[in-house]
Amino acid sequence: MKTTVEIPDALFRKAKATAALRGVRLKDLIVKGLELALEQPATPEPFRQTFPLVKGTSGRKLSNEDVREALESMDSEEAQAFAAHIRR
């Protein structure tokens, strides 16, 4: 099958030179590259935790926004004490 694919100029030149050094046609180098790429298993999406992540002392589940609001409402001394507690 024939198709048209846009390849960045620098990548095309490198592929063409590599094919020449290996004594193969550019087409064969591209086909082999696609075969190798398709043999690789798809990488799964990174795990992302759903919110809420934190339970408050009252048992209430806190969202990211709840935590942000609480931090913004603290004065600097409270914020420093909270940060020190989290780092432990």
Image: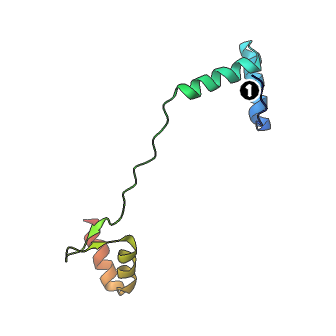
Instruction: Name, please, the residue furthest toward the front.
Output: 1
Instruction: Classify residue 25 as left or right of residue 38.
Output: right
Instruction: Classify residue 26 as left or right of residue 50.
Output: right
Q: Residues within 10 Å of mark 1 (few under 14, many from 20)?
A: some
Quadrant where the N terminus sits is top right
Residue 79 image position (x, y, % from top left): 33, 80
Residue 12 image position (x, y, % from top left): 77, 31
Dividing the picture into quadrants, the one containing residue 36 is top right
- Counting every numbered tag in the picture gives 1
Disc 1 marks a residue whose amino acid type is Ala
Q: Is residue 12 above or below residue 76?
A: above
Residue at 32 percent of width and 85 percent of height: 77
Instruction: Classify residue 69 as left or right of residue 60.
Output: right
Q: Is residue 30 above or below residue 44?
A: above
Residue at which label 1 appears:
15
SS at mark 1?
helix
Instruction: Name, please, the residue furthest toward the top.
Output: 23
Residue at 32 percent of width and 78 percent of height: 80
Quadrant where the C terminus sits is bottom left
Dividing the picture into quadrants, the one containing residue 64 is bottom left
In this rendered view, identify the residue nearer to me: 66 or 84: 66
Residue 26 image position (x, y, % from top left): 76, 20
Residue 76 image position (x, y, % from top left): 36, 85
Instruction: Classify residue 21 as left or right of residue 47.
Output: right
